[in-house]
Each structure stands twice: as C-alpha cells, then as structure tokens.
C-alpha cells in the first residue's frame, strides 16, 4: 500500500526536495505552506505520516503538532520534525507535544527515508 | 520453555559442537605444521563458549574460558614447540571446561579449587600475566576482537527498554524499535510484564510493557543506541555490553589474509550468511517428519499396487503419474533421511585424544590414521556407535599393539599404527579399525570358548572362525578376561550393539601381523530396499543388498549330507541350504518341488542359500521395529507393511546363518515362531 505523506514547510525548495525524495521512494506526497494549510489538508485527506518545519509564519510547527495531537483521529500518525537546530530543549518540547522524531535540515535523503521507514514500520 | 531458557538450550547444543571442535583442535596440536591453525581453532571454540556463556551470566564458565583463551593466545604468539606437557594442560583445561558447561546446564556449582592444578598450569603457561584476576572486567575487549579479515567481531549487548506509558501519544511504536535492532544482528527478546494491569484497569492507549533484549551484533554501541534516538527521555533504557561473541561459523575456515579490505558491511553480511547456513531443529520434529514420510511411502506403494491390480491397463497416463509419484516419494524420503545424517568425523574426532591418553598410560607408541571422516550416517547410529568405537580403539591399543621393545624384536617399527576409516558403499557404510599389532591369541580364545561351553572341545574351527568367537554373546561375561592376551574384552557387547543397529561385525586377524575389525552399518535405520518373497502362505522381505543371485528350480541341485544341513553347488563351491519352510515351521515336509533358491551373502559366514516358494517383487519398505517382547526372534530383524496392507517380517540372512550354528545344522526354534509373530504384529 502506498503511504501518503504530508510535508509542511514554508520554503518551496524544501517542499520540492522532500516531495521529490519521497516520490522517488514510492510515497504519495501532499504539501502545505504552513500549519493552518496543513490542518486543512489533513481535514480532507487520509495521511499516514507528517513531516513539519518549525518556524513558519501563519502557524508554527509546535502549534501545528499540538493541534494535530488534540485530534484523536491522528493518534497513531507519526509526526517528524524537520529543523535546522535540534537542541535538548527543542527535543523536550517536541516530546511533550507529541512529535515522534526529528530530522536535521539540510536533510540527507537516505537518512530521511530510513527514518520514515523506522517510524512507519 | 520461555525467553532465555529457549536460547540456553541452543547454547548448550552449540557448546557440544564447540567442545568437539576443541577436542579436534587439541588433537591436532602436536602436528607442528598445523600448530597455529589448531591453536586458532581451539581459541575460537573456547572464545565462542565464553561469549555465549556471558550472555546467560555463567560467571564461572566465562572466567575460566577467559583464562583458557588467554593461555591459547599466549601459546599462539610464541613460536616455540609445544611439548606433551603443554598439550596435556590444554586437554585438562578442556575437561574442566566441559565440567563447567555441564554445571551451568544443571545449575550446579563446581568447586574450582579441585581443579587448581589446571588453573595454575594455565597461568604458568601465560607467564603468570595473562590469566585474569577474578575481578578483571570481562567486558574489556579481548586481544582478538578483530576478525582475521579486518572486520569487527560481534558483541553481545544486553538492553533493557521500557517506554513510559504515554509513548503511544507520540505515535512511537516500540515494535518498530525492536525491529530496527533486529536488523543489526541476532536478537532475543524477553518481555517484562510486571506493570501490565488487569483487563479492567488496562488503558489501551498506554504502554505497559518493558523488554530485555539480547543483541549479538557487529555494530557498535552507538549504532545500537541510535535505534532509541526518538524515545530517549521517554523511556527507561539501558544498554550494556556483555561480551565479545563468536565471530565465525562452525567449521568455517579462518580467512588468514591480514589487513583485508572487507568493510563492516561485508563483515555483517558474512556474519548473517554464516548464521543462515544451518538451523537447529529438535530431533522430535525430524523424527516426526521421518515417520510421516514413511507412512507416505507405504500409502504410495499401496496405491500403486491396488491400482495396477484393478485398473492399470485402462489408464496408462495414471500409471505414468503414479510412477512419477513413486520417484518423488523416494527422493523425498532420501532428502528427509539426509537431515538426520551426520559426518562420522564428529565421532572420530574423539579418538586421537583417546589414543594419546592410552599411550601415556601403557607406555606404547601408537599412531592413529583416520580416513573418511566426511562419510555421513544416521545420527542415531553415530550416537550408538560412539561408545563401542571407543571400546575397540582401547582394545587395539591395550591388547593389539605390542610395547615398543616387543615390536622391535618382532622386526616391526617401534610405533604401532591404528587405522580408523569409514566408507560408504550403496546404502551401507563400513567402519574399519585395523592395527598392526600381535593379532588375536587364538589358543587363549579357544580355551576360553571351550571353558565357557560355547563350543565343544572336539570342534575344528578355522582361524577366522576362532577370531569371531569373541563376538559370541556371553564370551566376555566371565569374571576374568586377563587370560586372553589378544582382544576380547567386551567385544561381544560391542557386537550386540552393532547388531541392534542392523549392522554386522567381522573380525580378521593374523597372528603377529595385526587385526582388522569391520563394522557394516545401514545408512539409515528407517528404510530398506527389499525383495518380497513368499514362504508358505506368508510374505517376507529380504534385504536386496544381501542377495547375490537367485537360482531357478531347474538350477537347484540340493545334496544332503548326513549330520549336517543340505548343501548346493554354487559357482564351484558348496554352500549351506536353509529350508525356510522348515525353519519357520510352515509345514513339516517342506515346500513344493518348484521352489527357488536365493543365494545371500552374510558377513562373516559366507554364502547361504534360502529356499523360498516365490519371488513377489522388489520394494522399498519402511522398517518397523518389533516390540521388545518379540525382538529376539532368530533370523528376523524387523517388520514392515507391504503395498497390499499386509504385514511382512524382514529376514536377516546373517542371523539365519547364526541360527544354523558353526556346524551348519538348523535347530528347531523354541517358543513362538515367525508365523505367530506375524499374527501378533498384524
């Protein structure tokens, strides 16, 4: 079964790169520019995995994660955070909000696929 | 069995193999050219036992294996010759290792102080430095943690992992983490269910379980920890390196190329491949399979026969199909039997050491030459044969080979030679033990046999017949055997064991030149190529391999000799004739005029002609053992179910010739005859 991935990032380049990487690996990719748009996509599409940026203008990544986790219907859906800085504080906040894992930006395509496989096992 | 217990069994099975490797390696130590290979093999065996033992926390075993391997390591680094004393210490150390493994298996404590001489000797071999103090950290990397090919040796990690209850909210699946660890190597898992609440209190959205994982991997601790990257801080977790683990597959040849370019990926692949090369299956399962295949063989034979009898002519395609089916069934049976087959080398490997020890005790000088170790035979046969073989080797050294000065006087080289060999021919294998010693003392054997009443003083026996007297049941049960200076100690018991396995034993000895003992054994205990014959109203099966020729009624000229059995002339020689009718009490007057003579070969007793009424056909039969109450019927080795569903007894020509006795006269059977048994079995 083809897994559907939602990528939320305000940079078109990053969205494109993630999109190409995942399509090449056989995933179906949905894209959103910010948290709010992400929630709208989620409202009308089944999604198996979410990859989100943190710093976005309209709704930031942490708020987005909080919103998604407040909805029971996404209980089992892994959320990967993709960001330039992964500090302990950041991880701590991510864990508390319900993020599944994190990937450093710029990302290594192989590593991205590996992590996705790991969390969607 | 649960959790680790299951793996313990595997570990102990593996220990047996490693101990056998160790024995073989130590036996090879004295050969100077192979010295370092042998030390390496020994090291690997001990090292592997240590690694496994550590995973289960067998501390005494781990500590001693560590001293042992240190000593082996030191010896390998020195280039000086290994003398007998050093090899002796190694052998004692192997003994202690075995004791410690047994103790770990039975959860027993061994008082190592009983073995302080071994520990001390190991320490002095190491120059007193390499043996560890008991407090030494066993986790310290051993000197040879590097594989010869430059890859990394696998390590065992013990991991405890218990996610916090809320882990599922983050969509983290502990199973995915365990799956990831599994990709790193060999993983065994035990669940900790201590916090699992009752069903009423169970929160399905919370995580309640913990796991203890034992991982054997060539990856480093960082790689192992990486699997827990996302759960860190959301779980209780510990990773502890237990010990360096076995690196090379059993029997694998060490790749001696130092500084090889193999990267870690290759090492992992190699490790995984070596793990895949064999699997351990419980013998019960194999035997179940063997039995089921046996039933299929019978059903197939029955189906084919019934079909040919009823409608074969009208459906040629079906006949073809059934023949194909028969071929496949046969292949299936061979394949299943091959699962149980093991090389005799596992049994032979114990012998060099035995010979060495016997030489030390007796002061004799004996060289053991071994051939045909790769010959395979049924596992049960190997197990049953190991002790008799030890016995025969012991006899050969003890009684066969003369002391060096006596040999010199006889113009022989001071060192005696014992040859131990195995060879397959058809569906049987022959194991031979021959020595160039003094041969069997026939006078003593004769005296003893007469004394025991086994033969009459008036008997005139050939030399070979006298030699074979020592196989007669009861020969060695007399209290004193010391008057027999040749062989004879317990040989009859060995013979009984061999016969029980469907085998034969034959002795040829020449005074002053040596003794040659041959054991002929079936490759498998389960199937037999048989000739189905009719005797009176019943069917019997004769092993095809024992049949030399079948003579038509016209060709049979039977001569009666007063006081002995009938004989017939076959290829210029007179051979004994057994009237099967009479033997099995079918009818007093014997059969009709148009009977056939089947000439059979018996090891030891030459040719024998069996008179039967009719040959029904050739068939592969599945041997069913007779109930122990019926097991001792002379001339019968078992029973089988024929294609038509009837029971047939399997004849044993050699046993029939035993029944005739040395004088060639067939006595009447006492007790129930085969006809009666046939009814009982049916």
Image (spheres, rainbow, N blue to C red):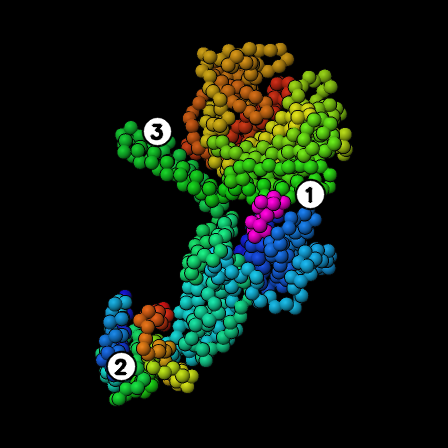
Q: Are marks 2 and 3 in contact (CB under 8 Å)?
A: no
Mark 1 belongs to chain = B
- Badge 1 and badge 2 in a common chain: no
The residue at the point 52 percent across, 42 percent down is B343
Q: Quadrant of residue B300?
A: top left
User: Disc number at residue B100?
Assistant: none
User: Residue B629: where, in percent of width, then height?
Assistant: 60, 36
Q: Are marks 1 and 3 in contact (CB under 8 Å)?
A: no
A68 to the left or right of B4: left
User: Disc number at residue A9?
Assistant: 2
The residue at the point 67 percent across, 66 percent down is B133
Task: Please tell me how crowded label 1 is: few (under 14), some (14-19), or many (20+) other residues with Cα within 10 Å.
Answer: few
As for residue A39 lying within the magenta part, the answer is no
Q: Nearer the viewer, mark 1 or mark 3?
A: 1
Marks 1 and 3 sit apart, C-alpha to C-alpha, by 64 Å
Task: From the image, tell me which residue sits under label 3.
Answer: B309
**Along the line of sight, the residue nearer the viewer: B46 or B81:** B81
User: What is the magenta range?
Assistant: B27-41
Task: Please tell me how crowded label 3 is: few (under 14), some (14-19), or many (20+) other residues with Cα within 10 Å.
Answer: few
User: Residue B107: where, in percent of width, then height?
Assistant: 64, 60
Per the image, label 1 sits on a secondary structure element best described as helix
The overriding secondary structure of the stretch rendered in magenta is helix
Give the residue furthest to the front: B79
Task: From the image, tell me which residue sits under label 1.
Answer: B357
């Amino acid at each position: 079964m083809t897994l559907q991935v939602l990528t939320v990032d305000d940079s078109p380049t990053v969205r494109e790169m993630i999109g190409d990487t995942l399509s090449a690996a056989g995933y179906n990719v949905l894209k959103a520019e910010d948290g709010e748009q992400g929630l709208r996509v989620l409202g009308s599409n089944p999604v198996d995995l979410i990859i989100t940026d943190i710093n976005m203008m309209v709704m930031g990544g942490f708020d987005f994660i909080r919103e998604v986790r407040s909805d029971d219907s996404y209980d089992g859906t892994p959320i990967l955070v993709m960001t330039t800085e992964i500090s302990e504080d950041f991880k701590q906040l991510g864990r508390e909000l319900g993020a599944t894992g994190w990937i450093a930006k710029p990302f290594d395509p192989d590593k991205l696929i590996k992590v996705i496989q790991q969390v969607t096992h | 069995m649960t959790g680790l217990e299951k793996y313990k069994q595997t570990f102990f099975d593996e220990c047996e193999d490693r101990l056998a490797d160790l024995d073989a390696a130590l036996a090879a130590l004295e050969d100077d050219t192979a010295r370092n290979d042998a030390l390496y093999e020994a090291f690997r065996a001990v090292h592997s036992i240590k690694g496994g033992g550590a995973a289960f926390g067998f501390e005494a075993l781990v500590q001693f294996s560590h001293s042992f391997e240190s000593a082996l390591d030191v010896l390998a680094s020195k280039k000086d010759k290994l003398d007998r004393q050093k090899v002796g210490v190694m052998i004692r150390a192997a003994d202690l290792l075995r004791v410690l493994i047994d103790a770990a298996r039975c959860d027993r404590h061994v008082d190592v102080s009983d073995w302080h001489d071994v520990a001390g000797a190991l320490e002095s071999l190491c120059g007193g430095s390499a043996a560890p103090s008991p407090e030494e950290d066993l986790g310290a990397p051993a000197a040879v943690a590097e594989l010869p090919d430059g890859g990394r040796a696998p390590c065992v990690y013990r991991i405890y992992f218990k996610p916090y209850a809320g882990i599922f909210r983050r969509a983290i699946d502990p199973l995915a983490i365990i799956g990831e660890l599994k990709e790193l190597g060999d993983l065994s898992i035990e669940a900790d269910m201590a916090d699992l609440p009752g069903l009423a209190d169970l929160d399905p959205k919370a995580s309640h379980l913990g796991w203890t994982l034992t991982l054997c991997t060539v990856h480093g601790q960082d790689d192992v920890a990486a699997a827990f990257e996302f759960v860190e801080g959301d779980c209780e977790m510990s990773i502890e390196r237990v010990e360096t683990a076995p690196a090379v597959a059993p029997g694998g040849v060490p790749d001696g190329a130092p500084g090889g370019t193999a990267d870690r990926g290759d090492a992992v692949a190699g490790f995984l491949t070596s793990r895949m090369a064999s699997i351990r299956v419980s013998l019960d399962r194999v035997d179940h399979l063997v039995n089921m295949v046996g039933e299929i063989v019978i059903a197939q034979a029955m189906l084919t026969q019934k079909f040919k009898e009823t409608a074969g002519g009208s459906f040629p395609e079906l006949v073809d199909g059934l023949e194909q089916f028969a071929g496949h069934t046969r292949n299936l049976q061979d394949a299943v039997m091959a699962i149980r087959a093991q090389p005799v080398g596992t049994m032979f490997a114990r012998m060099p050491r035995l010979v060495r020890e016997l030489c030390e005790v007796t002061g004799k000088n004996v060289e053991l030459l071994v051939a045909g170790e790769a010959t395979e035979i049924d596992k049960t046969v190997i197990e049953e044969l190991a002790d008799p073989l030890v016995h025969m080797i012991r006899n050969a050294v003890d009684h066969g080979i003369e002391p060096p000065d006596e040999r010199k006087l006889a113009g022989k080289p001071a060192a005696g030679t014992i040859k131990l060999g195995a060879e397959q021919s058809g569906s049987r294998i022959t194991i031979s033990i021959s020595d160039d010693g003094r041969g069997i003392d026939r006078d003593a054997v004769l005296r003893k046999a007469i004394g025991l009443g086994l033969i009459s003083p008036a008997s005139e026996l050939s030399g070979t017949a006298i030699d074979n007297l020592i196989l007669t049941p009861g020969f060695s049960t007399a209290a004193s055997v010391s008057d027999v200076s040749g062989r004879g100690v317990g040989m009859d018991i060995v013979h009984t064991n061999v016969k029980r396995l469907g085998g034969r034993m034959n002795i040829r000895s020449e005074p002053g030149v040596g003794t040659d003992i041959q054991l002929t054994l079936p490759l498998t205990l389960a199937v037999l190529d048989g000739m189905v014959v009719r005797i009176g109203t019943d069917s019997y099966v004769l092993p095809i391999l024992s049949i030399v020729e079948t003579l038509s009624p016209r060709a049979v000229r039977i001569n009666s000799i007063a006081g002995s059995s009938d004989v017939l002339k076959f290829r210029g020689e007179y051979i004994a004739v057994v009237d099967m009718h009479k033997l099995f009490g079918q009818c007093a007057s014997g059969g009709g005029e148009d009977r056939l003579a089947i000439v059979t070969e018996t090891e030891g007793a030459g040719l024998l002609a069996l008179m039967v009424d009719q040959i029904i056909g050739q068939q592969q039969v599945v041997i069913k053992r007779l109930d122990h109450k019926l097991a001792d019927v002379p001339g019968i080795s078992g029973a089988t179910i024929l294609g038509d569903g009837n029971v047939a007894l399997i004849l044993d020509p050699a046993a029939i010739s035993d029944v005739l006795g040395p004088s060639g006269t067939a006595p009447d059977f006492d007790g129930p005859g085969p006809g009666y048994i046939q009814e009982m079995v049916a």
